[in-house]
Amino acid sequence: MGVKGFVEGGIASIIAGCSTHPLDLIKVRMQLQGEIQTPNIRPAMAIQPGSVHSLPPPPRVGPISVGVKLVQQEGVAALFSGVSATVLRQVLYSTTRMGLYDMLKKKWTDPNAGGTMPLTSKIAAGLIAGGIGAAVGNPADVAMVRMQADGRLPPTQRRNYKSVVDAITRMAKDEGVTSLWRGSSLTVNRAMLVTASQLASYDEFKETILEKGWMRDGLGTHVTASFAAGFVAAVVTNPVDVIKTRVMNMKVEVGSPPPYSGAVDCVLKTVRGEGPMALYKGFIPTITRQGPFTVVLFVTLEQVRKLLKDF
C-alpha cells in the first residue's frame, strides 16, 4: 500500500530530527558566523586594506565552543530552540520525500534484476522525491532556521517566535505569504541533492555490503551504510545549506534593500567577503549531525518496517 511508505518514513524522520536537533542548531549558528550584515556595501568593498576602519577577522569558533557559549548565554533549553519547527518540517518534508522515494523505488525496480534498480534510477527517484518534499515543507524550514538563529541576535532585534505556528503566522502577516517560500529554490535544490545522495547511496552501500558478503542484513549493515550515506550527503549539500540558511535568515527592513537579492548574490557576497571556504562553514557539525541523523533515520526506518510488515 502506497501510504505505508509515507508513514514509515515520517516516523523515522521525526525521531531522527528531534534526536539530532541540537547539532542542527549549532550548525546553523556556525553557518551565520562572519556574515556581513551591511546590505548596501559589497563585502569585497566593505573594508579597504589599510583603512582606519579595518577590523581584524573574527576568530574561528568550533562547534564545541559554539555549543558551550550557547548554553552559557541562553540556557540548556536553547539547544532545542525551534524543535517544534523541526517536527513540522519532518512531517511535511521528510514524510513526503521518504514516501515518494519508496513509491518510485518500487515502481522502477526490475524484478528480473534481482529486485534492485540501477544507481542512476535511485538518484533520479531521490531528485524527484526531494524536490517535491522541499516545496511542501519550505514554510517549516524557514521558521526552523529563524527560530534556531534568533538567540544570536541582540535582544532588541530578536523575533521571539513562540512556536512554529506563531512564526509562520507572523511571517505571513508581516512579510507576506510569499515569505514562507523565501529561499525555496535553494531548499528544493538542497533537498534534491540530499535525498538523492542520502537515500540512493544508503541503498547502494547496503546492497554492496550484502552482495559482497561483508556483513549480514542486520544492525551492523544498517549503521555502516547509513553513516557512509550521511557523509556523502554532507559533502554534497553543505555549500547549498550555507546559502539557504543565510537567505532564509536575512532580515528585510521596510524601505531598505534586502541583504541579498537572491541565491547567486548571496554566494558572491559570501565568497568575496569571507572566501570560498565559507561555503563549508559548519561542515564539522553538519557531518556530526548528518552522520547520527542518517544512522538514526535508517536504523529506525528498518525497525519500523519490521513492525509494520504485516500491515
Image: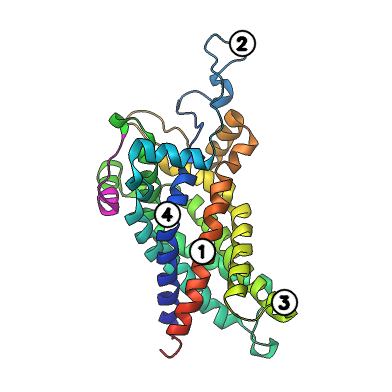
Q: CA separation, marks 4 and 1?
A: 20 Å
Q: Is residue 84 left or right of residue 122?
A: left
Mark sitting earlier along the chain (2/1): 2
Would you say residue 262 is visible in this rendering?
A: no
Q: Is residue 267 above or below residue 139?
A: above
Mark sitting earlier along the chain (2/3): 2
Q: Secondary structure at mark 2?
A: loop
Residue 21: assigned label? 4
Examine the structure image and report whether residue 166 is included in the region drawn in magenta.
yes
Q: Tell me the crowding category of disc 2: few under 14, some 14 to 19, or many 20 or more residues within 10 angstroms, Cα based.
A: few
- As shown in the figure, which amino acid type bears the numbered disc 1? Gly
Identify the residue at image location x=26%, y=54%.
Answer: 165
Identify the residue at image location x=57%, y=38%.
Answer: 267
Residue topped by disc 3: 214
- As shown in the figure, which amino acid type bears the numbered disc 2? Gly
Identify the residue at image location x=64%, y=63%.
Answer: 228
Q: Nearer the viewer, mark 2 or mark 1?
A: 2
Residue 50: assigned label? 2
